[in-house]
Amino acid sequence: MKLGSDSGFGFDPRDVEMFAEFFYDEKSVKKAETVENKLSCRLEELYKGSKRKIKLVIQEEILPIQIKTVWKKGTKITFTEKENQEASAALGDLIFVVDKKNPGLNGL
C-alpha cells in the first residue's frame, strides 16, 4: 500500500515532533539550528516605530513585529521554536536582525 495524500496517510513534519514528545525525553531530541534573517527597515521606521507581519510558510503562521524606536542596526528579535528546516529535529529559533535600508538616489 502506497502512503500519500490520496490514501489519506499523508506525512506531516509536525508528526515527528508529536512522536518525540511521547517516546523521548527532551534531552534526546535534537533542536534544529537557529535561522537568522535580515529585517530591513527604513530610517523613518526606526525613528517613528512601525509594525510588520512576517508570514512563515512552513508553519502557516504570521508573526507580528513591532519595530520600536529604540532599535538600531544589529538589534536581534528572537522568536523561539518557530523555524525548522530539519525534518527529524525539534523546532529551532528564528532570529531577525535589524538592518537599515540604504535610501536610493531620490531618498525613497
Image (cartoon, rainbow, N blue to C red):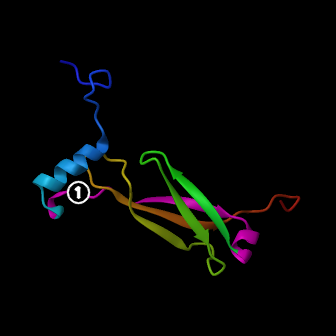
Residue extending farthest top:
1
Q: The magenta stretch spans which residues?
A: 27-48
What residue is disc 1 on? 30
Please state, as top left, top right, bottom left or bottom right, where the C terminus lies in the image.
bottom right
Q: Is residue 33 left or right of residue 21?
A: right
Quadrant of the rendered structure where residue 47 is?
Answer: bottom right
Q: Camera-side residue: 106 or 13?
A: 13
Secondary structure, mark 1, is loop
Q: Residue at x 31, y 21 (%)?
A: 6
Residue extending farthest right:
106
Q: Residue at x 17, y 52 (%)?
A: 20
Quadrant of the rendered structure where residue 12 is?
Answer: top left
x, y percentage for residue 107?
Answer: 85, 62
Q: Camera-side residue: 20 or 31?
A: 20
Q: Residues within 10 Å of mark 1 (few under 14, many from 20)?
A: few
Q: Is residue 14 left or right of residue 54?
A: left
